[in-house]
Amino acid sequence: MIEITPRISLSDDEVQERFIRSAGPGGQNVNKVSTAVELRFDVRGSPNLPNDVAVRLMKLAGRRLNQDGVLVLVAMRFRTQERNRADALDRLTDLIRQAAEPPPPPRKKTRPTLASKTRRLEAKGRRSDVKSRRGAVRSDD
């Protein structure tokens, strides 16, 4: 079991891992060893993910979510499979934790106070006065 929050945990069989070759420099080793990890998690088909969390997770995933509702994370930051696997799993849990947080309450509309309106207009007047005094310098000969 993968513990996300006290109320949400995923079973190990919900996450599929596939090892692929890393991109970038690395000499001969990069051509022989598959150290990068492609982690797949079916957001739509997960029975352990509440519906509202799944909807927020799909919005957060963006381009990492494919047409079938599968979240694909590729980790190739490190040189070993174990560290890349841990990195991909950490990124998945962080994304789900972020989706599990309740959305912020909607903003309440407020009107500016009379004092703030007055301060704003006075500042505009001062700035206007400074700018109106600018111009070509006249020489008095």
Image (cartoon, helix red, strand yellow):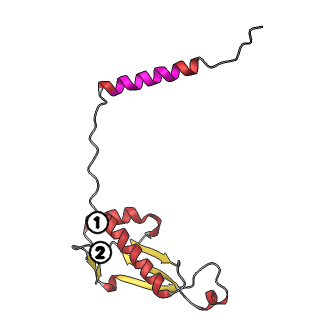
| Residue at the far right in the pictured view | 141
Task: Identify whether 111 is placed above or below 6.
Answer: above
* Residue wearing tag 2: 4
Q: Which quadrant is the C terminus positioned in?
A: top right
Front-lying residue, 123 or 57: 123
The residues tagged by marks 1 and 2 sit, at their Cα atoms, a distance apart of: 9 Å
Helix, strand or loop status at disc 2? loop
Residue 12 point in image, percent of width and height: 32, 85
Q: State the residue position of label 1.
A: 100
Label 1 SS = helix
- Identify the mark nearer the N-term, 1 or 2: 2
| Quarter where residue 92 is shown | bottom left
Give the overall secondary structure of the magenta segment. Answer: helix
Q: Which part of the image, by quadrant, shows the N terminus?
A: bottom left
Residue placed farthest to the front in the image? Answer: 141
**Picture coordinates of residue 19 (x, y %)?**
50, 86
Magenta-tinted stretch:
116-128
Please tell me which residue is depicted at 26% across the width and 50% down the height of the picture. Answer: 105
Q: Is residue 123 magenta?
A: yes
Answer yes or no: do the residues labelled 1 and 2 have beta carbons within 8 Å?
yes
